[in-house]
Amino acid sequence: MHLWRRSLQLVLGLLAFALSMAMLLHAGFGGMPWDVLHQGVVRRTGLPFGAVVVASSLLVLLAWIPLRQRPGVGTVANVVVIGVSVDPFLALLEATLPDPGTAARVALALGGVLVNGAATAAYIGARFGPGPRDGLMTGLVGRTGWSVRWVKTLIEVSVVALGWALGGTFGWATVVYALGVGPVVQVAARWLAPAGIADATRRAVPAAPAPAVR
């Protein structure tokens, strides 16, 4: 894949990811797990949603240090593009669908899961490095030896519980996202990450060398 195509795929994937976040939040049936936490912080602090997403991403990146994860261009782009674009997407949905009915809200929620799965495959498949939260997951897998399934479940259950305690919205769409986004990523990866999602992540963020024994 040519560099220009990878770059375009990265940017479009991240924009689509931000749009999917806005779709799920505007639907009101519960956001994706990390957004339950973000929404809870927003309600407690009054900060813009995008600012909370950026702050959360930076805190997660600090956890990369002991895990010896290395950020790539895609990692930085993830923080910037999503943080800058999610609030405009929320405003756009509020302007175009200020009071959606039940059918429209269900369509927004299910559409958000589909868009998010394709967006995830796109930005990871561009092979510029995983986002902060994906890197946290792969770093913990590498350090603990636990399976991806268990590490991802532990992280997302923890952030949902904390976000719900802070006032974030947890609902059926959160559960549908947790169960459904993986298969969507797998299908979308056939076109957007032909080398495979796991392979793209390993190539983008190689493991740090072990320290020399003296």
Image (cartoon, rainbow, N blue to C red):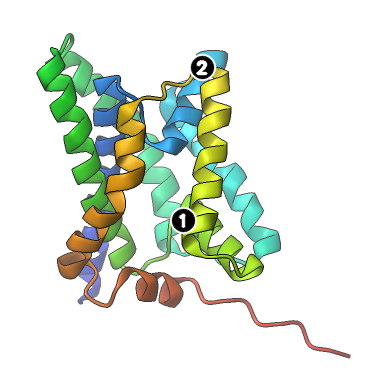
- Contact? badges 1 and 2 (CB < 8 Å): no
Neighbour class for label 1 at 10 Å: few (<14), some, many (≥20)? some
Residue 30 higher or lower than 214, as above or below:
above
Q: Label 1 to label 2, Cα distance in Å? A: 24 Å
Q: Helix or strand or loop: what does disc 1 sit on?
A: helix
Among the two numbered marks 1 and 2 on one chain, the one whose residue lies closer to the N terminus: 1
Taking the spot 89% from the left edge, 90% from the top edge, the residue there is 214
Mark 2 neighbour class, 10 Å CA radius: few under 14, some 14 to 19, many 20 or more: some
Most extreme residue toward the top is 99
Q: How many marks?
A: 2
Where the N terminus falls, by quadrant?
bottom left
Point out residue 32 in the picture as x, y percentages from the top left corner.
Answer: 37, 36
In the rendered view, tell whether residue 175 sits above or below residue 88.
below
Residue 78 visible somewhere in the drawing: yes
Q: Which label belongs to residue 167?
A: 2
* Nearer to the camera, 159 or 1: 159
